[in-house]
Image (spheres, rainbow, N blue to C red):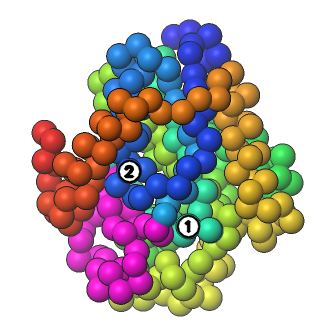
Amino acid sequence: MTALSENDWRLVREESLTGPMCMALDAVAAETAVAGGPRTVRVYQWEPATLSLGYHQNPEDIDWDFCKREGITVTRRPTGGGAIYHDTYGDISYSIIAPADELPSDLMETYELLCQPLLDACSVMGVPADFASETAPALHEPACYLRDIHPAHDVICNGDKLSGNAQYRRRDSIIQHGSLTYHATPERTLNCFVDPGVSTERVHERITGIDEHSDVSRTDAVQMLESTLKTWANATEDGWTDEERARAREIADEKFERSAWNRDGDDPMT
């Protein structure tokens, strides 16, 4: 395994995308990296707001009527864990994609390595974030930010969850993506679920956002994350090729926009 910075990396700066396209471009970036193209670090915004479901999510957990009424897209991730409400303003998301043989085989070691630019960005923002030092019990298992806090991949600030991260490990590639909360939206998060059985006040005690710890604007927070990702990977700023965008559109149409995948978890591309 060579040093990350010795490989060819690109930074794709924040772009606003639908939920299906957010996930499809991760898949395309993995195909590109495996084929010998650049590895990718990227930042993106979910437009419209999206509820991303974990790979094994029970669709009965979700209040589909609320999501439809509020214009919230629902799409299923290839990664595990609980559902995340990605508010267009309140959420900042990132992905890191590379060939599997260029990253540690140990899951915990990989999380520690790939979350470093996230922690670096928080430090630049003046937000005292770090991996959780101990577990905490779940408040509502179907929701990512309300599951039990895990030291391996949950980033906290003053005891409250700030970021959730997950990996999709295939034989030839690894995708890590994560959600960094800029502005917490506990009520809207809860409304996406059927009978969550926990109060908005209790949720706000569990989760936090950057804006509760720093005066940095969302725009500046995004730029700081982009900068630490770029430095960490020694990446060159670049974008998607026309072929990659067309391929992502194809994957979104065939998989991430399909009810069979989003409701039932049946992958139409396998």
SS of the residue at dot 2? Answer: helix
Query: How busy is the neighbourhood of tag 2: few (under 14 within 10 Å), some, or many (20 plus)?
Result: many
Which quadrant of the structure image shows residue 72?
bottom left
Q: Compared to 140, does 82 lie above or below?
A: above
Q: Is residue 178 left or right of residue 65?
A: right
Residue 172, x across and y down, in percent: 33, 22
Q: Is residue 43 left or right of residue 166?
A: right
Residue 156, x across and y down, in percent: 67, 58
SS of the residue at dot 1? Answer: loop
Q: Which mark is residue 88?
A: 1
Residue 146 visible in the shown view: yes
Magenta segment range? Answer: 48-77
Q: Is residue 215 magenta?
A: no
Query: How busy is the neighbourhood of tag 1: few (under 14 within 10 Å), some, or many (20 plus)?
Result: some
Q: Which mark is residue 54?
A: none
- Mark 1 belongs to which amino acid? Thr
Of all residues shown, which one is farthest toward the front?
Answer: 242
- Judge by depth and name the residue closer to the eye, 82 or 24: 24
Residue sitting at x 29%, y 24%:
171
Q: Give the mark nearest the N terminus, 2 or 1.
A: 2
Count of numbered badges drawn on the protein = 2
Residue 144, x across and y down, in percent: 46, 64
Q: Compared to 236, does 123 lie above or below?
A: below
In the rendered image, the quadrant that contains the C terminus is: top left
- Judge by depth and name the residue closer to the eye, 143 or 71: 71
Q: CA distance from mark 2 to mark 1?
A: 14 Å
Residue position marked by numbered label 2 in the rendering: 21
Residue 89, x across and y down, in percent: 62, 68
- Mark 2 belongs to which amino acid? Met
Residue sitting at x 59%, y 77%:
185
Q: Is residue 75 magenta?
A: yes
